[in-house]
Amino acid sequence: MLSDLLKRYVPGGIYGRAALILLLPVVFLQLVVTVIFAQRHFEGVTHQMTDTMLRELELVLDVVEKTPNLEDVPGAVSGALGPLDIRVRPVAEGAVPVGNPRLWYDYSGRVLTERLTRRLDGFQAVDLSDDNRVRIYIDRGRGPLELQFARRRISASNPHQLFVYTIFFSLLMTFIAFVYLRNQLRPIRRLARAAEAFGRGRHVPYTPAGAVEVRAAGNAFVDMRARIERHIEQRTLMLSGVSHDLRTPLTRMRLELSMLDETQAAPLMRDVDDMQRMLDEFLNFAKGAAEGEPERIDPRALVAEIVEEAQRAGHNVTLLPPEGEGEGTVMLRRVAMRRATDNLISNAVRYGGRAEVSVMLSDKALRIRVEDDGPGIPEDRRAEAARAFTRLDPARNQDKGTGVGLGLAIATDIARAHGGVLRLGESSRLGGLRADIVIGR
């Protein structure tokens, strides 16, 4: 339960998580220090100064009680206790403020009000709306009196400055921490971009940098990328070489068969054509997604062009209206994407009577969908169908063509090279196979 809650609210990126790890202790420490300091310092100082001021107020009230006429109180207090600089004057009942007004940021004023309420007999209200003066209203049976004196005598001056300084330096330290954090995470983000680009079939220059652990991961990625590229190059050269070398004897066989009687040579010529087609598929599989460089391509125009070529070849292929609200171009390898889409269409018209092609383009993804009305592929064998050299004889009608099981494998490799995936499912429109190439933008 707690884990699910944290996953929901904790940032997903390493930058946000690192910032959270760094800022939480700093903010917590600042809050603890501020609260403890405010409680121990401001409350303690305010209590001491208030107790001192209460003794002076008692002296003033003694003089007030000894003065028969309230109108003579200001002069009596000034004459007897002039050095205390406390002004006293009688006020009307309506002049006493309701509540204890104070400024919203006056933290020590709250402590002062509580202290006066508990310690001062006859206390009615205190007015702290002025930063420089304190007005206390007292009534001990002879009518309300207003006692006024300087604010600095009863509480520490400008207590809110502590909070201002705390916020200012917290923001300053947060800014410094973000600058440092950004420099530390920059090599990780560069490594992530290089790995993502390599997964999409692009080679981005990358030099390991940063902390020791990040450099170690970067060097491991560079070595891994070099090994994968060498493996792909060796595989391509090997299959290309074998396929190319086999073309020569096939050509000689075709020439020799052309000299035989047409009736006798027809079955053998079909075998030679099948071998030629297999070699072409081997070459296409060897090339994979390595042909060409990624470029900005309008996927809808590309698919429309492929469908038109299939229609001219006599295939029953229909291009559905475009889906999605996205517009523009996508970074694709034109030759590779053309081969993948063409393979899906060829499979659709080979094992079904007709095919429908649609393109969905949104702000986040590109989807090229090919559906047919053929027998489809069982759900438990779809992963197997996407592997190279796999032929699902029971599931696909082999009377309609001969293959070596590379069509879906080529489309899968090309989709992965673009950072996408090939998804196989059941067509709800036609009832056959539904093949989707999904690539993130």
Image (spheres, grey):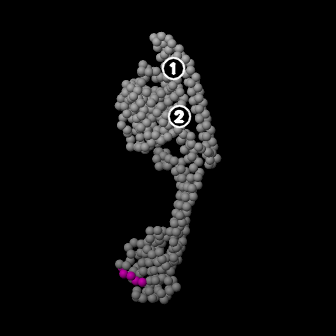
Crowd band around label 2 with a 10 angstrom C-alpha radius: few (<14), some (14–19), many (20+):
few
Please, what is the three-letter code of the amino acid marked with disc 1? Met
Crowd band around label 1 with a 10 angstrom C-alpha radius: few (<14), some (14–19), many (20+):
some
Q: Quadrant of residue 250?
A: top right
- Residue carrying label 1: 275
- The x and y percentages for residue 96 are 38, 77
Kind of element beneath mark 1: helix
Q: Quadrant of residue 376?
A: top left
- Residue carrying label 2: 291
Kind of element beneath mark 2: loop
- The magenta span reads 89-93
Residue drawn 54% across the image and 41% down it: 197
Residue drawn 51% across the image and 39% down it: 294
- The x and y percentages for residue 428 are 36, 31
Residue drawn 41% across the image and 40% down it: 361
Drawn side of residue 427 relative to residue 222, left or right: left
- The x and y percentages for residue 372 are 39, 28
Question: Sequence-wise, which precedes: disc 1 or disc 2?
Answer: 1
Please, what is the three-letter code of the amino acid marked with disc 2? Glu
Toward the viewer: 334 or 258?
258
